Image (cartoon, rainbow, N blue to C red):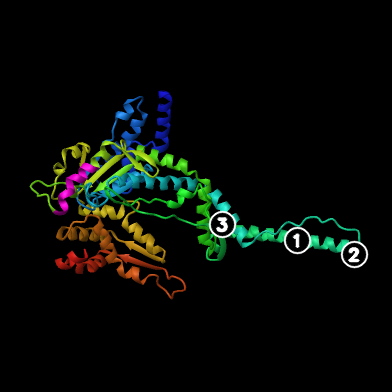
């Protein structure tokens, strides 16, 4: 029996985790995130160790716990982005929460157990969407067939009537009627085939159609527990789904909306939600990632009095501690064990220190990585190197309006210098400063596009050089008060 369980665990490991080495994981992260090599290496090892654990034989597997991390660094240096990218890379359910929104048991506020409930909800949606994508073509075929029936019903196929021998003329007339009915039937069939092909494309999405569909959505309610107001999405309709059939209702909608509604109906029939829930819970327990941001906000700084809104800081740490140590949380999908969920805590730690956290909490986050502040050269790389760089994003956005953006090397350097200067003279918000810089630079272009008489966009090329950038940003950086307000 133990051997069977070991084999099943190894099979699950292959399904849940892509077999990526730490070096490959870092290489994938490098495609989107500039610098922060220490943080990338630490997270890559933590992720690989989860796969290694599932390959360990025997009882020792359950004794191996994840090595949780604390990421320390100012805002905008990539802490959240690293966690988000690693979750996408391994198709792991991830939830990001702010530690400061939770309160200690006994105060009205969010209960920390909602972290696991929200993570499980996200995993269920993720697995359901994956299964839906795998059968989307088949389901869309069913949706199109239903729409064809609504738009062009198929008449009953004419049958051969038993002809009476009253007269030869009547027999010939009866034969002619049958022939005409057969022709109409074949004509409708041809129309239905043409309609089916058109419905496969967005060509008819604006047309109106009357469909019969089940009522969508259920009633949500909030539960006031002893820990506070808990936002539990309890779908009351699902309680009665197995007892009574959902009522159908006629509604007139666009074909595009009808596709969405009918696809949801067909998905409910085709996707086994019991199997989805089982896989989602397993994925949470084996591969779930919880990213707790602003962890420094609940650290009790030495010498600080406990009063006012800070009174529950240590209490929140103690409430989170059982989740990190390993416990079982009851969700609406069933019990979920947190023993092997990876927890990543992050904070700027400008005022407080990691040592200000309670010792038990520190002990459950043995790995600590300090992320570097971003330099001017880092900003240059962030603007140009990643697959999703800001320059590529804005270029793609405006290309939809027939506007071509061209950035010179001098322009990129000037943008990086302006962002660095603004961070030094006002609040340091890291790479997020680049969003403001680019928005200001392209404000007029974004407002005026598309160019032309409105019938068709007029192609236009906009070149940004160093002089253009310096002129546009000079008014923002020459006056510190203005820079504080805008940048």
> Which label is found at residue 259?
none
Label 1 packing within 10 angstroms: few (<14), some (14-19), many (20+): few
Nearer the camera: disc 1 or disc 2: 2
Picture quadrant where residue 334 is located: top left
Residue closer to the observer: 449 or 56: 56
Residue closer to the observer: 364 or 396: 364
- Quadrant containing the C terminus is bottom left
Picture quadrant where residue 285 is located: top left
Picture quadrant where residue 190 is located: bottom right
Residue closer to the observer: 123 or 202: 123
Q: Is residue 317 magenta?
A: yes
Magenta residues (range): 308-319
Asked if one can make out residue 257 in the rendered structure from this viewpoint, the answer is yes
Answer with left or right where residue 405 lies relative to residue 164: left
Q: Position of residue 274 (x, y in %)?
A: 46, 41
> Which label is found at residue 183?
1
> Which label is found at residue 169?
2
Q: Main secondary structure of the magenta part?
A: helix
Q: At numbered mark 1, what does the secondary structure look like: helix, strand or loop? A: helix
> Which label is found at residue 200?
3
Q: Is residue 73 magenta?
A: no
Answer with left or right where residue 296 lies relative to residue 217: left
Residue 171 to residue 348: above or below = below
């Amino acid at each position: 029996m133990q051997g069977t369980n070991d084999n099943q665990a190894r099979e699950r490991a292959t399904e849940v985790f892509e077999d990526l080495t730490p070096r490959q994981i870092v290489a994938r992260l490098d495609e989107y995130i500039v610098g922060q090599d220490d943080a990338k290496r630490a997270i890559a090892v933590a992720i690989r160790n989860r796969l290694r654990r599932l390959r360990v034989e025997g009882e020792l597997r359950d004794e191996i716990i994840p090595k949780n991390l604390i990421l320390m660094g100012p805002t905008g240096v990539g802490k959240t982005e690293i966690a988000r990218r690693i979750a996408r890379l391994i198709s792991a359910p991830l939830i990001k929460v702010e530690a400061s929104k939770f309160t200690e048991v006994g105060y009205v506020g969010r209960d920390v157990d909602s972290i696991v409930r929200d993570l499980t909800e996200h995993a269920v949606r993720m697995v359901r969407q994956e299964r839906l994508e795998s059968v989307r073509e088949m389901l869309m075929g069913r949706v199109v067939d239903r729409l064809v029936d609504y738009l062009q019903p198929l008449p009953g196929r004419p049958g051969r009537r038993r002809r009476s021998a009253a007269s030869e003329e009547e027999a010939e007339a009866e034969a002619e009627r049958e022939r005409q009915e057969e022709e109409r039937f074949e004509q409708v069939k041809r129309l239905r085939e043409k309609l089916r092909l058109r419905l496969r494309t967005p060509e008819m999405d604006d047309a109106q159609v009357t469909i019969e569909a089940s009522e969508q959505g259920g009633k949500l309610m909030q539960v006031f527990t002893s820990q506070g107001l808990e936002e539990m999405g309890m779908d009351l309709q699902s309680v009665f789904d197995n007892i009574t059939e959902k009522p159908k209702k006629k509604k007139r909608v666009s074909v595009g909306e009808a596709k969405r509604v009918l696809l949801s109906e067909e998905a409910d029939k085709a996707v086994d939600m019991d199997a989805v829930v089982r896989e989602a819970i397993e994925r949470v327990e084996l591969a779930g990632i919880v990213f707790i941001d602003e962890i420094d906000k609940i650290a009790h700084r030495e010498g600080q009095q406990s009063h006012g809104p800070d009174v529950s800081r240590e209490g929140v740490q103690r409430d989170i501690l059982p989740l990190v140590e390993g416990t079982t949380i009851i969700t609406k999908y069933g019990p979920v064990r947190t023993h092997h969920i990876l927890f990543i805590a992050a904070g700027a730690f400008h005022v407080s220190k990691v040592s200000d956290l309670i010792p038990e909490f520190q002990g459950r986050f043995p790995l600590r990585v300090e992320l570097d502040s971003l330099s001017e050269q880092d900003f240059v790389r962030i603007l140009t190197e990643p697959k999703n760089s800001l320059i590529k994003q804005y270029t793609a956005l405006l290309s939809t309006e027939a506007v071509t953006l061209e950035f010179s090397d001098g322009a990129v350097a000037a943008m990086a210098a302006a962002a660095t200067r603004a961070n030094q003279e006002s609040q340091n918000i890291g790479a997020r400063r680049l969003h403001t810089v680019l928005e200001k630079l392209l404000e007029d272009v974004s407002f005026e596009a598309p160019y032309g008489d409105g019938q068709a966009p007029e192609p236009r090329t906009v070149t940004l050089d160093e002089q253009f950038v310096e002129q546009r940003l000079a008014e923002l950086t020459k006056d510190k008060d203005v820079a504080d307000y805008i940048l």
